[in-house]
């Protein structure tokens, strides 16, 4: 469905229990991502929760009116929340969507009851680790020049964005399914302008680490042991700085444990939300 939010048509879907507490899912990869993978991964939670999925401004099926700033994206989430549920939400963000989940709870703390983060980072200080790991893979088509161009947001066309993204696909998962990856690559809505703004303007300024101690709601931090682009260190720093947090590392996953170890991931999310139901403020800081 489409809804006009802050002057921009936003694509969204609502799944699950209409009487359940709402969870908003924020996808990653601006200009590459959309909500379909989150729908695939998390629809089973709909037995108990109302699930709200959206394509962010400039990504997927949503309209692409600038600006593509973190401030604007957080404001879009807030306006959609007010229009659809008008109640505090649980927010789950993965990868770049984790940046936006953190930006949202920092900007709108009264509107969040739980934060769930997957394979994300607290700042832009870790790209050199990702580039080093990618180069060490010696994958065909993965060169320093191409990686720097991708990370700097200097992509020149949708086709170039697709080619660059295709080259690094084997880095993302522990088990690589070439046929499934090709099918997914062909289904992506490529929006190189959105990617470029996110990586050339937003990311160099991104650093929420100083604000993390102000997040008081229960927070689940998850990461795949073999994540190349937001390595385990990033999640360890987040969990270290958020007081009421729990860190879980998925040993058999790369960047997408919600897909790679889906059953265990959903079990963890359910247990976390049940244990930390509204009114409980248990301190849970552990590593698995």
Image (tube, rainbow, N blue to C red):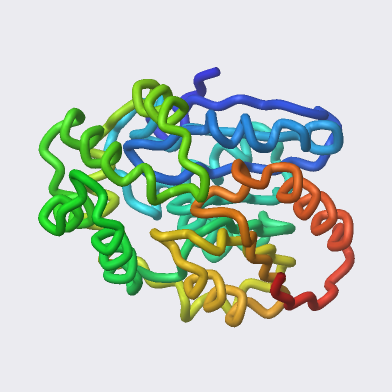
Tell me which residue sits at (29%, 32%) in the image. Answer: 65
Left or right relative to 215: residue 211 = left
Which of the image's four quarters has the N terminus?
Answer: top right
Residue for point 63% across, 42% down? 24
Residue 214: quarter of image: bottom right
Nearest the viewer among 230 and 137 is 137
Q: Nearer the viewer, residue 14 or 170?
A: 170
User: What residue is drawn where x is 55% and y is 27%?
Assistant: 12
Left or right: 110, with 2 as reference point: right
Q: Is residue 1 above or below residue 139?
A: above
Dividing the image into 4 quarters, which one contains the C terminus?
Answer: bottom right
Q: Could you say which is closer to the camera, residue 222 or residue 58? A: 222
Residue 225 drawn at (x, y percent):
55, 64
Q: How many marks?
A: 0
Rendered image quadrant of residue 242? bottom right
Q: Position of residue 203 (x, y in %)?
A: 30, 61
Return the x and y of residue 73 as percentages of the image width and height.
43, 46
- Asked where in the image residue 181 lies, by quadrant, the reply is top left
Q: Position of residue 55 (x, y in %)?
A: 47, 32
Which residue is rendered at x = 16% and y = 35% of the image? 160
The residue at the far top in this view is: 1
Q: Quick check: 192 left or right of 257?
A: left
């Amino acid at each position: 469905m489409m809804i006009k939010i802050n002057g921009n048509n936003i694509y969204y879907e609502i799944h699950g229990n209409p009487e359940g507490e709402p969870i908003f899912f924020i996808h990653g990869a601006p200009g590459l991502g959309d909500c379909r993978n989150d729908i695939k991964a998390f629809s089973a939670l709909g037995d108990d929760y109302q699930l709200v999925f959206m394509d962010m401004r400039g990504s997927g099926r949503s309209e692409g009116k600038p600006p593509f700033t973190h401030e604007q994206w957080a404001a879009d989430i807030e306006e959609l929340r007010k229009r659809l549920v008008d109640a505090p939400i649980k927010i789950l963000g993965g990868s770049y969507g984790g940046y936006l989940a953190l930006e949202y709870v920092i900007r709108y703390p009264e509107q969040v009851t739980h934060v769930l983060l997957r394979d994300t980072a607290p700042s832009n200080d870790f790209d050199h680790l990702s580039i080093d790991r990618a180069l060490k893979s010696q994958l065909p088509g993965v060169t320093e020049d191409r990686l720097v161009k991708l990370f700097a947001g200097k992509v020149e066309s949708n086709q170039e964005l697709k080619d660059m993204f295709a080259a690094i696909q084997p880095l993302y998962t522990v088990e690589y399914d070439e046929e499934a990856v090709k099918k997914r690559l062909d289904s992506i809505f490529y929006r190189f302008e959105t990617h470029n703004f996110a990586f050339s303007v937003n990311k160099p300024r991104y650093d929420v680490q100083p604000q993390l101690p102000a997040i008081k709601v229960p927070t689940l931090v998850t990461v795949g042991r073999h994540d190349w682009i937001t390595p385990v260190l990033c999640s360890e720093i987040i969990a270290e700085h958020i007081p009421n947090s729990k860190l879980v590392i998925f040993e058999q996953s790369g960047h997408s444990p919600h897909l790679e170890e889906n059953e265990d991931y959903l079990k963890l999310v359910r247990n976390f939300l049940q244990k930390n139901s509204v009114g409980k403020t248990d301190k849970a800081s552990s590593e698995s």
